[in-house]
Image (spheres, rainbow, N blue to C red):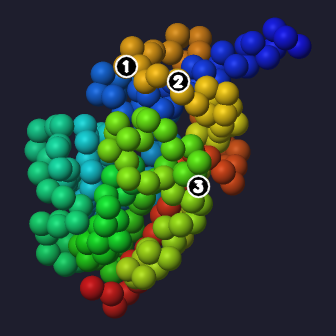
Amino acid sequence: MKIMWLWYTRLARMAGFLFFEVIYLELYEGEGWYFKAREKFLRGNLTDVKPTTNVLDVGCGNGLVNHVLKHCNVTGIDSHPRYEGAITAAATAIPFSNSTFDAVTCFDVLEHIEDHEKAINEIARVLKPGGRGYFSVPLYPQLWSKHDELTGHVRRYRTGELYPLLNRSGLKVLKKQYFICSLLPLVFVIRLFFPSQKVSSTVKARPALEKLLLCLCQFDLYLRLPFGLTEFIEVRKEDGDC
C-alpha cells in the first residue's frame, strides 16, 4: 500500500507540474505530450468543419488550428501571433466585417480577457448566421495556481458558466465535451498535497510517462466523461442575428 501511494503521489506531482507549469511554455509547445493530446482532441471534435470553410482562429498562438484545419481557409488573429501570416489583433476588436466567417475557433483564450463578454459578442458578430463557433476554457476556480497568474489568466470557469453569455450573443450551445478527464483527480491531489510547489520551466515527461498520459487522454475521447480540466463547447449562430 505504501509503495502504491508513493507511486500515485509521484505521478500526481509530475501530472501537476505538466498541467500547471509547462502546458503553454513555448519551449515545449509543439512537442510535448499535452500538445499532442490537444491536437488529437481538436481533430476529433472539428470533423464537421468542411473543406474550403472560411475559419477565423481567435488567439491563434503558434497555429495549431491552422495545422489541424489545413484543408480550410484559416485566418488567425492574436495579440502576439507566433506564425507567419497571422494578424495582430485583439479578440475584443476583431478587424473584420459582420458575418464574414463560416466558423470561428477560440481555444484557451477567453480566460485571458477581462471583458470576455465583449470578445464573445465580437465573435458572434463576424460569424455568419448558421455558422459554427468552437470554444474551450479551463475549469475549476479552486484549481487556481501560480501558473494561471504567470500565463496571464484572469479566471478559471465553472462548468456551464459560459452558456448564458453565449446565448445572449445569439450563439446556441449544440455540444459540450471535456478534455483531460481521467487525470483530473491527480490534479486535485497535487493542489491538495503540494499547494506551494514552485514553478519550473525544466519539467519534461519521461517517454514512458508521456506515453501513459497520451493513452489516458486518448481513452477520454471515447469515454466522454462529464467532467475534465477543460470544457469544449460547440455553438451555432442563430439565423437573423448580426
Count of numbered marks: 3
To which residue does mark 2 refer? 197
Q: Which callout, 3 or 1, points to the residue nearer the camera?
A: 1
Q: Secondary structure at mark 1?
A: loop
Q: Which dot marks residue 201?
A: 1
- Label 1 crowd bin: few (<14), some (14–19), many (20+), radius 10 Å: some
57 above or below 27?
Answer: below
Residue at coordinates 57% horizontally, 59% vertically from top-left? 158
Of the two numbered discs 3 and 2 on the same chain, state the one appearing first in sequence: 3
Q: Which callout, 3 or 2, points to the residue nearer the camera?
A: 2
Find residue 10 and report its horizontal and vertical position in percent: 66, 15
218 above or below 78?
Answer: above
To which residue does mark 3 refer? 177
Residue sitting nearer the eye, 7 or 75: 7
Find residue 111 and report its horizontal and vertical position in percent: 39, 54
Q: Quadrant of residue 48?
A: bottom left
Find residue 81 and report its horizontal and vertical position in percent: 17, 43
Q: Is residue 38 left or right of residue 125?
A: right
- Which residue in the rendered view is the most extreme toward the bottom? 240
State the separation of the CA atoms marked 3 and 2. Answer: 30 Å
Residue at coordinates 75% horizontally, 12% vertically from top-left? 6
Q: Which dot marks residue 166?
A: none
Q: Amino acid at mark 1?
A: Ser
Are the residues at dot 3 and dot 2 in contact (C-beta closer than 8 Å)? no
**Looking at the image, can residue 44 be seen?**
no
Q: Secondary structure at mark 2?
A: loop
- Label 2 crowd bin: few (<14), some (14–19), many (20+), radius 10 Å: some
Residue at coordinates 17% horizontally, 67% vertically from top-left? 93
State the separation of the CA atoms marked 3 and 1. Answer: 30 Å
142 above or below 114?
Answer: above
